[in-house]
Image (tube, rainbow, N blue to C red):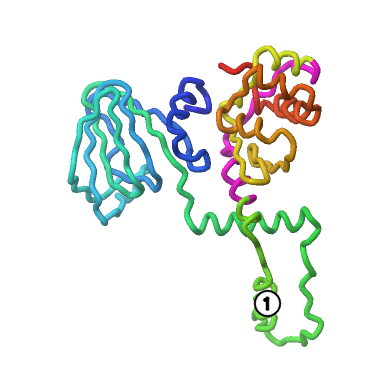
Amino acid sequence: MDLHDDRARALLDRFRFVPDARLDDLMISYATDGGGVGPHFDSYDVFLLQVKGKRRWRISAQKDLTLQPGLPLKVLQHFEHEQEWVLEPGDMLYLPPHIAHDGIAEGECMTCSIGFRAPSESELTAQFLYHLAERGEATGKAGALYRDPRQAAVEQPAELPAALVERVGAMLANVRWNEQDIASFLGTYLSEPKPSVVFDPPQRPLNEARFIGAASRSGLRLDRKSNLLYERRFFFVNGEEISWTGAKKWLFELANLRCMSAKRFVTLSHDSPVTALLHEWYCAGWIQVGEIA
């Protein structure tokens, strides 16, 4: 919902005591009396905020997470609750990953689910290696091509040559990375919008001069779909890495507050590289004119 409604985005922002790199999304579930999805577990941290009506939550730290076969949802086959609470509007329940839970509506109810990213080790490993490969191609450092000039003629052509395995193993052993490579990967990967996200560029975009004038009067804000992260040397916006040396503190402020006041923008309006960058983001639909939606 945070991608489609500014009020939902504002509610999600109340949870930014957790780093944006971990904050995922806000979903809303509606149910009539007795409704629910059944006992299940999530693979990520989640806050369950009751916003309308009542919902009875039963939870368990059980180790048996076997799922019922043949169902489109991942419903637990065996569920034995250990604790339970009835949440009323304003109440909230925090659940760590893999805590079994079952929520049943008591009358008509609505619950907000605020989820956090918890990528697996295998996911991070695969994506990081892909990131290294992409950077190697982008910088022209793809390395030498595989060659085997001493490969003799074979009688079993389908057999994988032992020399091939050994040579490729040696090539992979030469893969190197440093802390900046890891930071660059995390910044681009964790700021990348989900595949379903589509930005809405302005239908009749202002040219840069008019954009500067409008932002000087009304300020700027990040689009609710945009992700802007940073570390010591780089900014990461919607999956793109940007090296920036000038006006860093104002970009820090835009990232942390998700908006920039008109007064603050005026102090930047003389800096053409900054305004050109912000105008580019505006034309892409990544930022909007106006501090408040």
The magenta span reads: 184-209
Q: Position of residue 203 (x, y in %)?
A: 71, 17
Q: Is residue 186 magenta?
A: yes
User: Considering only vertical position in the picture, is 96 above or below 285?
Assistant: below
- Residue at left 71%, top 19%? 266
User: Considering only vertical position in the picture, is 195 above or below 264?
Assistant: below
Task: Say which of 254 and 195 sits in front.
Answer: 254
> Dot 1 corresponds to which residue?
170
Q: Position of residue 137 (x, y in %)?
A: 76, 56
- Could you tell whether 18 is left or right of 255 in the image? left
| Quarter of the picture holding the C terminus | top right
- Residue at left 73%, top 40%? 244
Mark yes or no: residue 289 visible. Answer: no
Residue type at the position of mark 1: Ala
**Magenta part mainly helix, strand or loop?**
loop
Q: Is residue 258 magenta?
A: no
Occupied quadrant, residue 125: bottom right
Considering the numbered disc 1 on the image, is that residue within a helix, a strand or a loop? helix
Mark yes or no: residue 4 visible. Answer: yes
Task: Say which of 185 and 60 sits in front.
Answer: 185
Query: Counting other residues with Cα less than 10 Å from the Cα at mark 1, is it few (<14), some (14-19), or many (20 or more)?
Result: few
User: Considering only vertical position in the picture, is 130 above or below 18?
Assistant: below
Q: Position of residue 176 (x, y in %)?
A: 67, 66
User: Considering only vertical position in the picture, is 152 above or below 292?
Assistant: below
- Could you tell whether 132 is left or right of 97 in the image? right
